[in-house]
Amino acid sequence: ILLFGVIGLIGCGTSTTSQPSEKTDQGQAADQNAEQTTAEDKTYVVVTNAEFPPFEMTLPSGEIVGFDIDLMNAIAEASGIKIKIQHTGWEAMLKAVENGNADIGASGITIRDDRKEMYDFTDPYFEATQLILLPEGSNISSAKDLEGKNVGFQSGTTGETAAQNIFGKDYKGLKGYADLPTAVNDLFTGRIAAVIGDNAVVAEFVKQNPDKKLQLVKDEAFEKEYYGFIVKKGNQELLSKLQDGLKKIKENGTYQEIYNKYFAE
Ligand code: ARG
């Protein structure tokens, strides 16, 4: 707001001066300067649903960390832009990028044709698939074996789509949650029989809860997915900066370093 104010004032000064030729030159120089400063100082707002370990999670201190966060910081550095990370709900995150309240979405977002109508995606940076998370000894070897039971997922995600495809949209046992940890919690209390979610994330829940004796089941119907970062559709300028940064960190080994930090065996 301040910057726009300054630009506005410069504009006014130019148009009300009494020596047109000279003032116009000065005005142009000032305007260019202002624009340059604006571009350099711009801090892009990155929104993320930080309830999706290990891609994005919030520490007790309030700090947002994770694979996507490290990648975004590395990309920003490589492409010379400033960013700040903000936590929102999943659907709020998508909305914020769509309506321009945020610049970038970094949230393990699967590249999908329907989403491409609203967003431009970077190149893929991670391969994923859905998996079923459930207690050991559940005697379930495919999604169909869950017929008649409650199945949880994060609303508005590919986990929801996968569940709908298997059981039908009108299946009574479909339970959508605002975030995945709440779904997993309902699994622990027995409210639902299984959670369908992104493989690396449900694997993280298995790892973090050894006492709960959880297992993962893959269904043949689950397809390969690829994560990309999003910008508002048509924001070619920002997209190419992200693409450039992503390419650089893949080439210079930074991507691999970050990958190993979170996913090395
Ligand atoms: N990959 C899935 C999708 O795009 C789930 C992503 C959820 N991400 C999150 N941070 N909660 O639909």
Image: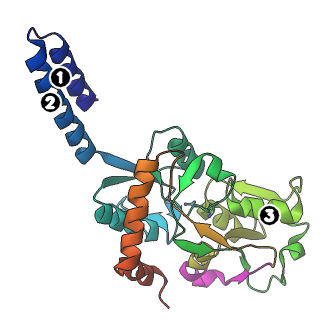
Of residues 17 and 212, the one nearer the viewer is 17
- Marks 3 and 1, Cα distance to the nearest angstrom? 57 Å
Residue 130 in sight from this viewpoint:
yes
Residue drawn at point x = 59 percent, y = 64 percent? 181
Mark 1 vs 2: CB contact within 8 A? yes
Q: Is residue 65 left or right of residue 9?
A: right
Q: Is mark 2 within 8 Å of ligand 1?
A: no
Relative image position of residue 129 (x, y in whole percent): 67, 74
Tag of residue 10: 1
Residue drawn at point x = 60 percent, y = 83 percent? 211
Q: Which residues are magenta?
A: 206-219
Q: Say whether disc 3 or disc 1 marks the residue closer to the N-terminus.
A: 1
Of residues 241 and 145, the one nearer the viewer is 241
Which amino acid is tagged 2?
Answer: Ala
- Marks 1 and 2, Cα distance to the nearest angstrom? 7 Å
Quadrant of res 228: bottom right
> Is 120 above or below relative to 142?
above
Q: Quadrant of the N terminus?
A: top left
Q: Is residue 69 left or right of residue 89?
A: left
Quadrant of res 255: bottom left
Q: Say whether disc 1 or disc 2 marks the residue closer to the N-terminus.
A: 1
Q: Quadrant of ligand 1?
A: bottom right
Of residues 240 and 49, the one nearer the viewer is 240
